[in-house]
Image (tube, rainbow, N blue to C red):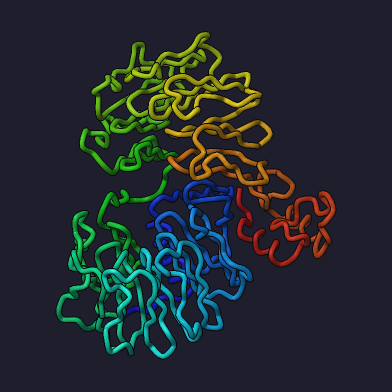
Amino acid sequence: MPKIRLKKAILLMAFFSIFFSQQSVLAQKTSGKIVGWGSQVVGVDLRGGFTAVSAGVYHSLGLRDNGSIVAWGDNYYGQCNVPSPNIGFVAVAAGYWHSLGLKADGSIVAWGGNVDGQCNIPSPNTGFVAVAAGSDHSLGLKGDSSIVAWGRNDYGQCSVPSPNTGFVTVTAGSIHSLGLKTNGSIVAWGYNGDGQCNIPEPNSGFVAVAAGDDYSIGLKVDGSIITWGANNEGQCNVPSPNSGFVVVTGGEDNSLALRTNGSIVAWGEEVGDMPSPNAGFIDVSSNSGIQALGLKSDGFIVAWGYNNLGQCDVPSPNTGFVDVSTGIDHSLGLKADGSIVVWGDNAYCQCCVPEPNNGFVAIASGENHNLGLKTNGSIVAWGDNSCGQCNVPEPNSSFVAVAASWNFSFGLKADGSIVAWGMNYYGQCNIPSPNRDFVAVATSPYHSLGLKANGSIVAWGDNSYGRCNIPSPNSGFIAIAAGYDHSLGIKAVDEDINNDGYVDFKDWALLANKWLMDCSGPDWCGGCDLNKSGKVDLDDMEMFTQYWLWE
C-alpha cells in the first residue's frame, strides 16, 4: 500500500469526518475566518491548529495540536462539554450522543449521553491506544492488541469474539463493530440484519477498515475496496475503476475514498459527482440541499444534484450569467443584460418571469416563488402566493437587496431598514427594533439574519439549536448566511492589522513592534494579539503567516 505522509493523512481524515457530519455546514473564504453557530457549528474558530476530527450525528470533535479538544454542535446530553483538564488528548471519537477522548497516558475520558453506560469505561482505564464510538456503545483498543467494549449491547455489539487478540484497528457502526487483525483479516460483530457483519471471502489482505451506519468497508493491500451490508442508497457500489485507493471512510448512507493521485471518489446517498474542473467558481446556490448551482467567472452555470424536474438542465445558451439562485425544484439565473432565466418545476408558474423581463439586478428564490430586484429599486414577485409571499408591500421602491425562503420574502431598503412579508409562523418576519442600519439580510425557513453597518449581526425567529445565538464578540462581520438549523458569519481578517486590504510587510512591522507586549489593557497591542491570549507571541505569528500576502 502506498505510504501517505502523516500530516497529509490527518488532514484528509479531517476532511472526511467533517463531510459526513449529518447536520453541519462549514465554509471558508480565503480572505476571512469562520464563526458559526446552531445545530452543528457553534461559535468555533476552525481556522487551524487541528490534528484530528470526528463527527457524530449532531455534534463534532476537533483535536488541537496542543492536546485540547474543541467540541461543537448539539449539546443536549452534554456531549460538547469536554471535562477538565482539557489537555493531553491524542485521539477523539464522536458517537450519536456521547464523546470519547484518548489521553497520551493511555486513559480514556468519556462524556455526554450515558443511558446505556457508553461513558462508563471499564477498569483498568489504562493502556489504550485507539478509541471508536458507535451509536450507544464504545470501543477501546489496548496496547496488547485486545479490544474493550462497553455500553449498549442488545445486538452483541460489545461482545468481542474470541480470541480477543491481534487487533490493530477498531471501528464502530451504528450498532455493529469491526476489528482489523495483524494478519489482514477483519472480525465483525453486533447487529447483522443488513449483512454488515458478513465479511466477503477471501477475508485477507485488508489494511484498513471503516464502518457506515449499517454497512462496512474494507481496504485491500492492492488498493481495492470491498463493501458489504445495507445498500439501499448505493453506499456499497464502489465506482470503477476500483483501484488505487489509500483511505476509506463511511457515513450514514454514503462513502468517500481517497486515491493515490489525490482525487476523492464519493458514492451513496445524495453525494453526486462534483463537476470537473472544480475551479473558477465565483458564486454558488443550494436552497433545497439536494441540488446546487455554481456560477463560473466566465458566466457559465454548472448544475448538479437531484434533477427530477429538470432543475439542473440549464437552458441554452449557457452564457452571460452574473447571479444564480435555487428554489426547491427550480433554478434561476440572472443575465448580464438584466433578464432572468428560470427552469425546472413550474407547478406554481415560478418559471413565468413577468414582462418586461429586463432591468433586473438581483434575484432570490423561496420554496416555490421568486423575487427580482429592478434597477429602479422595485421588486417583482411571482410564483406561489399562498401565504402572501408575492404581495410586495407599498411603497414598492428604494429596495437595494432581496432575500427569500420557504413562503416568505425580504427586501432591504436604501435607508437600511428591512421589509418582510409572507408566512410568519416562527416570527422570522418580525424584524427587531431598531429596524435600521442593515446592510445585508439572509433567511432560512425558520429564522432570519441581518448584518448591521457596524459589523454586528441581529438574528430572529425560531431559536431551536441556538441558530439565533450569535457568539461573542458580535462584531467585525462582513457577510452572513442562514442554513436550516445553523447560521454563518464571516469576519474580516484580523491579520490585516492596518486594515488596508492586504496582509503584508506593513502588518508585519506592526506585529514586530508589539512583540511580547502585555496586551491586558484596552487596545494596548493595536490588534496584534490575534488569538486574544494577552500577549503577542509565536502563536500570533503562526496565525499571521497563514494569511501572508493575501488580499
**Residue 220 vertical placement versus 391 (above, below):** below
Q: Give the residue drawn at x 19%, y 59%.
A: 231
Q: Position of residue 495 (x, y in %)?
A: 68, 53
In the rendered image, the vertical position of residue 18 relative to residue 144, given as above or below:
above
**What residue sits 58% from the left and 55% below the top?**
45
As displayed, is residue 339 above or below residue 243? above
Counting labels gives 0
Q: Position of residue 397 (x, y in %)?
A: 53, 12
Vertical relation: 1 (above or below) 165? above
List x then y, in percent, for residue 6: 46, 76
- Quadrant position of residue 287: top left
Q: Position of residue 129 (x, y in %)?
A: 46, 82
Does residue 8 appear in the picture of this structure?
no
The quadrant of the image that shows the N terminus is: bottom left
Q: Nearer the viewer, residue 433 or 4?
A: 433
Asked whether residue 494 appears in the rendered view, the answer is yes
Residue at 80% x, 63% y is: 515
Quadrant position of residue 248:
bottom left
Q: Is residue 281 left or right of residue 110?
A: left
Q: Quadrant of residue 199?
A: bottom left
